[in-house]
């Protein structure tokens, strides 16, 4: 144990980024060098990932939280947390992390067929060996050429699927006629030379081999070899091959697609894959030191279009689903879909090609219960202090005129609103136990708070930006109260709490101008009939690309055992989507703004359930425009049965719905041209401050858990040089 | 990471004069229809952030010689618009994909619309020169027009040389030929013309313009060599154009010319073969080889050294040219520009 | 601890991810710009003995030679073009002529502009007081000359084309040297309009023996105002 006084680190914000930073800084290896205090508004950790337990202990989330199988950093840290926690499996249902996560291999998109009907197109993504967070076996496995090979391989797989549907059995002799690729199968498989490739292409074209799907597939195999050694071949040869494949595949498959919906969908995906390949080669992404950042000025659709994708493919469920996953709508406007092409490409490649275990992983309880409660417990054990009900009001910089020569600007003080005080100055105990699992409640424990009854009666909403009432204020000063600051609040909050920095620093101004966020809306329903009965066939499926505003739906039946319903519901479904901002932003004093938006979400949800959900759940409809409201399970009703129950849309009030409009709850977007305005946690302009969050330049510059965790780890590195860069998986990545 | 050595005066002055010019430019960009096919394109490059060195040099020279800011602002606007118009055409001719961190105009809109926008932008740039008749009088306005015409001719000749070299792929372009080409293509528009007309405005026509050719040539050439160096070794995040694009283009830079001389005959043949194929036919391996050879034979260092030497000559010419003028911030700015060319990225 | 002793973060080695593909071939944390693929570099770079100062001096000398040469050439050209035998406005004409010479599409606009400015008589009059006296105007020349009699002496075949605007009517015409597209070829200088008998203008063109074949062209101007009123071209040879 170090004898010297520990370095005081104030981590402001208890979401993924802040918690990851705290976790890194307090590793046993540091031997107590850093003492961390986490400042959190309200009563629960988690930020955008927070969840609570409501009536019947039902889980209430901000939205749909799923972890993707490529979240190496997020899983690695969480697994370490669980390992350190060492819960007793006899007492706690989630003692091992694998108890808390369930693979969700059925993922799909909703496609709008020409006759106006919606169809869900589900795919099963095969499990890949290993588990996310396992140590990597290859030193830095991410390279553009390996992605190119995988993409070309995927292309071939999709073409094979088309061929299979067509009914033609693949003929092993077919491509052999022209002898064009014999040397591929020969001994001593060296990479062919440029002239050999040119010859091979010429032969493919000449003998009309590409006039069959089998021939196109063979050409795709050739492509796989070529992109694996891209540096050898002049760009135009590779593109010629690619274009030959495209033209001929189009010719063959377009005809078949007219009659077969499944082939049409496959062809849409193939088009996107071809466009992506073309773009990766044409834009020289394999050689550019900036990697995929090169194309970040383009919107992803625009970029695909530039590379030959048709409008039809761009409107397919596949593309809409991917975009919906990223909430990629500027200002929440569905007419303005915008996602930076580089971010989209990086994300898609990582998502499909580097997942381990399953493509998606769902949590078996709320994210707060699965992730933040364990972190809270481990961090407390390590000596981290938590200050709940502390909301950051302002970051104060030192007076610029009084800096010594050569001294950098720095943070002099942090002003907090103390929203409530704990009785007897004790520490707030935030967790409750449900079925042996430590959980976060949906409301604060007023009993622990000074004047708690009054606060509850007056409805103080500690998580609302527009709640201005508070119990007091506190100012922390540098040297006395902290040495370093990790600013881990959401990007939406930055203009409010960093007014000084934004005013003085043009880079921060550019950042808040360009790195934008979007509000989201979500609702959850509990139903008395199972999904299969309602007409939904895919267990644990998630679907995206559906009708706005709730374009993402997830089947969450696995949560039923965790909740405490006297009569268990048979189905749980989560819905979420973007929530457009109003034309004029609300003023700081508009205290009823959150309530108004929440009412709007309720109306949206009711409308959605009446009109749209029938496409996915055909038997949930009473008529063409009416939902079977009696399906919904009302916790109040279960508590006191026999009371009058409504069977119309007012029944919806008993469900959970939310408008996530608080600035720090807004979801971070990756708009074209915005990435270069991000600032890195490593940036040392203010030499006692580092930033953390999915809005920073953390390598994977997109709004998600993985980016936030990476940024938190980078913030820890900024202060302590640990973890080393190569340990942050995917940071160095094209 | 390299921290730039701060010359705050140069950066501040560029920001100040640049912002004044940019505001003034806005008045001249038409905002009528057709927008989507023309006027939005015309406005695109001027609105992307550039260093604004050319108009700033014009304003600073004018003021150093005693003019008021308003006298020189119109000409500064014309210079910047003309520069941007030429950039549009340059980008098409070079087949560049990126300009100031964003896609080039012809990549965004196709070559025909971009060419048209470039021509229109040239026309637009004439207006402030015509309006000069009202601000500085017809005689000076006319002399500035003459200067502009001269500069236009030199620029066209320089561009013709460079394009001709690219087409015919001569292996015998020597340093002298390179310097002449840079003088015409780059220096006249970037440094010589802005300072000559600035001096004309400031001295109301009573000034010998010949020494500005020398000064402008040395500064402009150092600027161009530095630009070519950045294309190879610049920080990609801040450079804004395609790294090593010049190698892919086979552009005759001082580094390439040095390399041509330094290679052994069989390697020269290899280089010649590579340069003689078109861009699509070049493979990344060949480009990498050229780059490695440049490092191995010291071509990059050579160019860097020469650029510094030219900067020294520029400072000498500066003292001959501006030495007699009263001290001013603008004088210091012009002097600072000479070293600033090495610090920008 | 006082404010002066407050803790400061140490500067990071880098603040951005390494996105280049060659990351896979070398250990991370090595400085950027290292050669991918392990190409051998000569040790210690390439600083030759004798250092760089010779190289630099050579380079600067060369640059001085180039620029002096260019300046000299420019002065010569300026002198050649600098014959002021007309009243003010002639400079505009010269500018126009030169523009015709090398007009790429980009610069055709200048000619249009030059034309419009030339037509703006007010501004032209203010340009400068003409140092030369105005050429005397014979009474004959005011008598609505619309006819031109052309006499050409040339050892080689030559074809003359003369375009005159309607505004040329009644003007006393003048033309300067006719120049070829190729600046290397000498201009046709022996070209002269004189007032002839009966209100006609006489045009005399003499083509020297060694004149290289080409198309030689020039503007025809109104002698009094200097405004262009037409063009004259002579095709020498085939």
Image (tube, coloured by chain):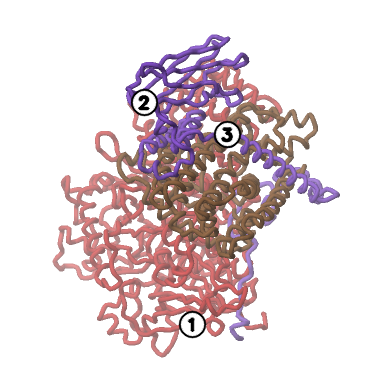
Chain colours: A red, B brown, C purple
Query: Is residue B283 left or right of A710 when viewed as pictured?
Result: right
Q: Position of residue C125 (x, y in %)?
A: 39, 42
Label 1 Cα crowd, 10 Å radius (few <14 / some 14-19 / many 20+)? some
Residue shown at the point (56%, 68%) measured from the top left: A685
Give the residue furthest to the bottom: A424
Q: Position of residue B35 (x, y in %)?
A: 33, 41
Query: Is residue A484 left or right of A694 when viewed as pictured?
Result: right
Q: Quadrant of the N terminus of chain B?
A: bottom right
Q: In the rendered structure, find residue A476 and report the number of the disc placed on it.
A: 1
Q: Nearer the viewer, mark 1 or mark 3?
A: 3
Q: Nearer the viewer, mark 3 or mark 2?
A: 2
Give the residue furthest to the left: A644
Residue shown at the point (25%, 80%) measured from the top left: A458
- Residue under label 2, please give it: C139
* Residue B10 visible in the displayed image: yes
Query: Is residue A707 left or right of A190 when viewed as pictured?
Result: left
Q: Is residue A317 above or below residue A679?
A: above
Please state the chain letter of the residue tagged with numbered disc 1 in the rendered image.
A
Gap in angstroms between the C-alphas marked 3 and 2 = 47 Å
What secondary structure is found at the residue carrying circle 1?
strand
């Amino acid at each position: 144990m170090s004898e010297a006084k520990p370095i005081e680190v104030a981590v402001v914000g208890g979401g993924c980024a802040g918690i990851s930073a705290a976790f890194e800084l307090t590793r046993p290896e540091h031997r107590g060098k850093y003492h961390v205090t986490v400042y959190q508004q309200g009563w629960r950790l988690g930020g955008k990932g927070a969840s609570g337990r409501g009536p019947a202990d039902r889980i209430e989330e901000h939205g749909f939280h799923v972890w993707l199988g490529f979240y190496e950093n997020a899983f690695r840290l969480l697994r370490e947390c669980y390992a350190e926690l060492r819960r007793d499996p006899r007492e706690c249902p989630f003692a091992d992390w694998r108890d808390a996560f369930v693979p969700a291999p059925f993922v799909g998109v909703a496609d709008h067929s020409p006759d106006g009907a919606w169809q869900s197109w589900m795919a099963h993504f095969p499990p890949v060996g290993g588990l996310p967070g396992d140590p990597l076996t290859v030193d830095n496995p991410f390279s553009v050429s390996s992605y190119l090979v995988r993409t070309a391989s995927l292309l071939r797989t999709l073409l094979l699927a088309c061929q299979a549907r067509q009914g033609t059995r693949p003929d092993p002799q077919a491509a052999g006629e022209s002898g064009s690729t014999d040397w591929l199968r020969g001994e001593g498989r060296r990479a062919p030379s440029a002239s050999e490739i040119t010859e091979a292409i010429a032969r493919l074209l000449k003998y009309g081999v590409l006039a069959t799907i089998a021939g196109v597939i063979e050409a795709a195999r050739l492509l796989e070899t070529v992109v694996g050694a891209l540096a050898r071949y002049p760009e135009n040869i590779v593109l010629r091959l690619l274009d030959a494949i495209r033209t001929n595949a189009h010719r063959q498959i377009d005809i078949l697609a007219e009659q077969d919906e499944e082939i049409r969908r496959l062809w849409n995906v193939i088009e996107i894959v071809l466009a992506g390949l073309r773009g990766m080669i044409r834009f020289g992404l394999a050689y550019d030191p900036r990697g995929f950042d090169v194309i970040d000025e383009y919107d992803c659709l625009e970029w695909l279009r530039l590379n030959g994708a048709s409008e039809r493919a761009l409107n397919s469920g596949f593309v809409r689903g991917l975009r919906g996953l990223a909430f990629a709508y500027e200002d929440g406007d569905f007419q303005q879909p915008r996602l930076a092409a580089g971010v989209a490409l990086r994300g898609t490649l990582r998502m499909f090609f580097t997942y381990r275990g399953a493509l998606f992983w769902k949590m078996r309880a709320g994210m707060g219960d699965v992730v933040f409660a364990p972190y809270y417990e481990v961090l407390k054990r390590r000596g981290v202090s938590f200050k709940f009900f502390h909301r950051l009001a302002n970051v104060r910089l030192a007076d610029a005129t009084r800096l010594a020569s050569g001294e950098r600007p720095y943070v002099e003080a942090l002003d907090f609103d103390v929203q409530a005080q704990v009785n007897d100055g004790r520490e707030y105990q935030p967790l409750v136990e449900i079925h042996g699992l430590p959980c976060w409640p949906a409301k604060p424990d007023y009993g622990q708070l000074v004047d708690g009854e009054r606060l509850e009666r007056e409805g103080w909403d500690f998580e609302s930006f527009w709640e201005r009432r508070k119990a007091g204020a506190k100012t922390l000063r540098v040297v006395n109260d902290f040495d370093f600051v990790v600013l881990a609040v959401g990007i939406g909050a930055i203009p409010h709490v960093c007014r000084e920095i934004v005013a003085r620093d043009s880079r921060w101004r550019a950042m808040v101008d360009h790195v934008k966020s979007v509000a989201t809306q979500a609702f959850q329903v509990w139903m008395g009939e199972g999904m299969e009965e309602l007409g939904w066939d895919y267990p644990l499926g998630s679907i995206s690309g559906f009708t706005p505003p709730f374009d993402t739906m997830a089947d969450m039946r696995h949560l039923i055992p965790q909740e405490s319903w006297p009569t268990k519901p048979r189905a749980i479904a989560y819905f979420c989507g973007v929530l457009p901002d109003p034309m004029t932003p609300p003023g700081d004093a508009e205290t009823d703004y959150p309530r108004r938006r929440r009412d709007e979400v309720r109306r949206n949800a009711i409308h959605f359930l009446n009109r749209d959900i029938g496409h996915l759940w055909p038997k949930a409809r009473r008529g063409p425009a009416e939902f079977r409201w009696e399906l919904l399970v009302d916790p109040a009703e279960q508590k006191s049965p026999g009371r009058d129950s409504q069977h119309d849309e007012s029944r919806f009030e008993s469900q959970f719905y939310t408008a996530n409009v608080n600035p720090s709850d807004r979801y971070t977007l990756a708009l074209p041209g915005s990435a270069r305005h991000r600032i890195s946690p490593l940036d040392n302009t203010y030499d006692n401050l580092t930033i953390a969050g999915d809005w920073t330049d953390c390598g994977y510059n997109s709004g998600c858990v993985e980016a936030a965790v990476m940024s938190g780890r980078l913030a820890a590195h900024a202060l302590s040089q640990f973890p080393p860069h190569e340990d942050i998986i995917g940071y160095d990545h094209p | 990471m390299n921290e730039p050595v701060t010359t705050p005066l140069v950066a501040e002055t560029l920001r100040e004069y640049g912002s004044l010019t940019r505001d003034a430019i806005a008045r001249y960009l038409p905002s009528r229809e057709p927008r989507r096919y023309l006027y939005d394109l015309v406005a695109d490059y001027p609105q992307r952030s550039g260093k604004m060195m050319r108009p700033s040099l014009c304003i600073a020279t004018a003021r150093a010689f005693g003019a008021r800011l308003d006298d020189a602002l119109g000409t500064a606007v014309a210079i910047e618009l003309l520069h941007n118009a030429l950039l549009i055409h340059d980008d098409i001719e070079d087949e560049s994909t990126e300009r100031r961190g964003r896609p080039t105009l012809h990549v965004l809109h196709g070559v025909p619309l971009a060419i048209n926008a470039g021509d229109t932008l040239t026309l637009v740039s004439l207006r402030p020169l015509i309006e000069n008749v009202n601000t500085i009088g017809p005689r000076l306005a006319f002399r500035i027009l003459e200067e502009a015409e001269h500069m236009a001719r030199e620029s066209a000749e320089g561009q013709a040389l460079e394009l001709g070299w690219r087409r015919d792929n001569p292996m015998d372009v020597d340093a002298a030929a390179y310097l002449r080409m840079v003088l015409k293509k780059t220096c006249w528009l970037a440094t010589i013309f802005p300072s000559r007309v600035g001096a004309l405005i400031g001295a109301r026509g009573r000034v010998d313009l010949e020494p500005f050719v020398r000064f402008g040539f040395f500064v402009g050439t150092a600027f161009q060599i530095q630009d070519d160096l950045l294309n190879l070794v610049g920080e990609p995040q801040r450079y804004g154009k395609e790294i090593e694009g010049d190698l892919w283009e086979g552009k005759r830079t001082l580094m390439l010319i040095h390399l041509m001389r330094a290679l052994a005959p069989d390697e020269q043949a290899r280089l010649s073969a590579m340069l003689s194929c078109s861009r699509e036919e070049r493979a990344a391996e060949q480009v990498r080889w050229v780059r490695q050879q440049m490092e191995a034979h010291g071509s990059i260092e050579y160019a860097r050294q020469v650029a510094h030497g030219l900067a020294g000559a520029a400072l000498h010419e500066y003292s001959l040219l501006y030495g007699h003028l009263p001290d001013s911030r603008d004088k210091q700015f012009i002097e600072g520009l000479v070293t600033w060319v090495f610090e920008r990225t | 601890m006082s404010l002066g002793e407050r803790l400061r973060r140490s500067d990071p080695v880098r603040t951005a991810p390494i996105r280049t593909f060659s990351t896979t071939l070398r250990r991370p944390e090595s400085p950027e710009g290292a050669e991918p693929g392990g190409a051998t570099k000569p040790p210690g770079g390439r600083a030759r003995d004798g250092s760089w100062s010779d190289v630099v001096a050579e380079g600067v000398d060369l640059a001085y030679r180039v620029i002096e040469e260019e300046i000299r050439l420019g002065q010569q050209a300026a002198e050649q073009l600098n014959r002021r035998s007309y009243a003010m406005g002639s400079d505009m004409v010269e500018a126009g002529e030169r523009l015709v010479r090398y007009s790429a599409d980009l610069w055709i606009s200048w000619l249009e502009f030059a034309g419009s400015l030339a037509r703006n008589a007010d501004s032209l009059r203010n340009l400068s007081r003409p140092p030369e006296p105005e050429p005397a105007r014979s009474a004959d020349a005011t008598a609505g000359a619309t006819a031109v009699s052309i006499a050409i002496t040339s050892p080689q075949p030559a074809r003359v084309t003369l375009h005159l605007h309607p505004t040329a009517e009644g003007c006393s015409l003048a033309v300067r040297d006719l120049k070829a597209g190729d600046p290397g070829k000498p201009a046709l200088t022996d070209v002269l309009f004189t007032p002839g008998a009966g209100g006609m203008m006489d045009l005399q063109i003499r083509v020297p023996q060694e004149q290289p074949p080409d198309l030689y062209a020039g503007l025809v101007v109104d002698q009094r105002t200097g405004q262009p009123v037409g063009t004259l071209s002579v095709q020498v040879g085939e």
